[in-house]
Amino acid sequence: MPEEWVLRIDAVLGALPSCRQESAWTGTRWRVGGATVAHVFGGEDQLFRITFRGESDEVAAFEHMGGPYFRSGWGDNYIGLLLDDDTDWDELAELLTDSYCLQAPARLAEQVARPGV
């Protein structure tokens, strides 16, 4: 995983209340309490992926959009995104913030400013 990408993701998630970066079974993940907010991994096939949580209507929309989004088989509210040189980092930051707010306890999520919410 390119370190620059991990640092960009950590700049977003590490700024959120009680969200911490840690090594995962593969790659790196960010958690709040015991809940995973995002997980970045890959490289063996020269593709890098990030998974995160979304509202069920968003999951369906992203799945139907196709690449660079993909459906993760880990649950019904996971969104997957292939990372590359064309990744829209501003959009990803919003999606990661939403994922955090879905996973964090309400008292922490209420502290986060979310555009459009």
Image: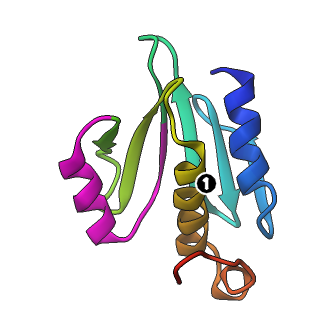
Secondary structure at badge 1 equals helix
- Which quadrant of the structure image shows residue 101? bottom right
Residue 23 is situated, as x and y percent measured from the top left of the image, at 71, 36
Residue 46 is situated, as x and y percent measured from the top left of the image, at 46, 11
Residue depicted at x 39% and y 44%: 80
Q: Along the horizontal axis of the image, is 61 left or right of 41? A: left
Residue 87 is situated, as x and y percent measured from the top left of the image, at 51, 35
Task: Tell me if residue 63 is in the magenta stretch.
Answer: yes
Per the rendered image, the range of residues in magenta is 50-67
**Type of amino acid at the residue the image marks with label 1:** Ala
Task: Tell me if residue 61 is in the magenta stretch.
Answer: yes
Mark 1 Cα shell of 10 Å, populated few (<14), some (14-19), many (≥20): some
Q: Along the horizontal axis of the image, is 64 left or right of 38? A: left
Image quarter of the N terminus:
top right
Q: Which residue is mark 1?
A: 93
Residue depicted at x 23% and y 47%: 65
- Can you say whether 82 is above or below 69 in the image? above
Along the line of sight, the residue nearer the viewer: 63 or 105: 63
- Can you say whether 107 is above or below 99 in the image? below
Along the line of sight, the residue nearer the viewer: 10 or 106: 10
